[in-house]
Amino acid sequence: MPAFDDSFRRALADLFAWRRDVRRFRDGPVSEVDLRACLDLAHLSPSVGNSQPWRFVRVADPARRAAVVASFERCNAAAAETYADERAALYRQLKLAGLREAPVHLAVFCDDATGAGHGLGRATMPEMLRYSVVGAVQTFWLAARAYGLGVGWVSILDPDEVRRGLDVPASWHLVAYLCVGRPVEEHLDPELARHGWQGRDLDACCLFER
């Protein structure tokens, strides 16, 4: 068994703290070796019944990427209309995706029809399949940070449009669309906190007792 000492734990805490949602990326490609290393680590993530339902799709085709950008722009405009006054103005000032700049796009799907795992652990909570994919996304995100890469999770998309545009099976459900590349800047604080959208939620930090 490996020994995780105080030095490792401090470095791990730094990794967690410096994992930021990145929307601004440098020009230049991502090392294929580094990308594959991060994906290999993501595949070590836990999954319900050992079902491993995640499906990573690299989106490299320019037309498919343009369709994703168009979906974002439509959904983002619609989202802006749900806010009013100062909040609406602030929303429109936020940079909420790095789709045009990121050298790597990864669409991460959950294969709802997977036979792996034989249904173990999800008879009463079938959503555990998708939660397992979220765990793999988080593992990939932390691994990418350790390799000096930034990751931005884009959720302002129509998932059905993305699935159809990428020509994947109908049983695949979009969980995450990730932009990956070298970040332009580094910040310890979240961008949304820095720009006045939402600070730290103290209730989320509580341990509730029952």
Image: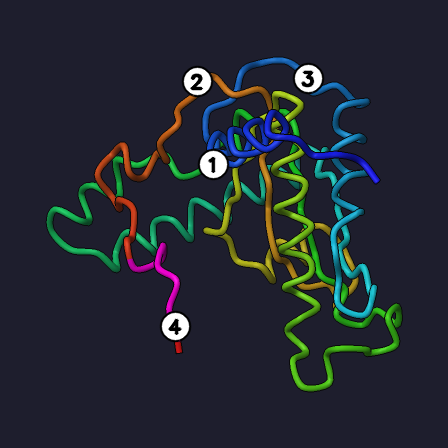
**First of labels 1, 2 by sequence position:** 1
Which circle, 3 or 4, is nearer the viewer? 4
Q: Earlier in the sequence, mark 1 or mark 4?
A: 1
What's the mark number on residue 209?
4
Is residue 81 in the magenta section?
no
Magenta extent = 203-209
- The earlier-in-sequence mark between 4 and 2 is 2
Find residue 203 and report its image quarter: bottom left
Which of pointers 3 and 4 lies earlier in the amino acid sequence? 3
Q: Is residue 45 left or right of residue 8?
A: right
Q: Is residue 131 left or right of residue 152?
A: right
Say above or below: 84 vs 7.
below
Nearest-to-viewer mark from 2 and 3: 2
1 vs 3, front mark: 1
Q: Which disc is residue 39 wearing?
A: none
Amino acid identity at mark 4? Glu
- Could you say which disc has been placed on residue 29 in the image? 3
Dot 2 corresponds to which residue? 185
**Which residue appears at 54% of the width and 16% of the height?**
26
Q: Quadrant of the N terminus?
A: top right
On screen, residue 6 above or below 158? above
Q: Is 209 left, or right, of 30 in this rendering?
A: left
Q: x%, y% of residue 83?
A: 21, 56
Which one is closest to the eye, mark 4 or mark 2? 4
User: Amino acid under label 1?
Assistant: Asp
Q: Quadrant of residue 150?
A: top right
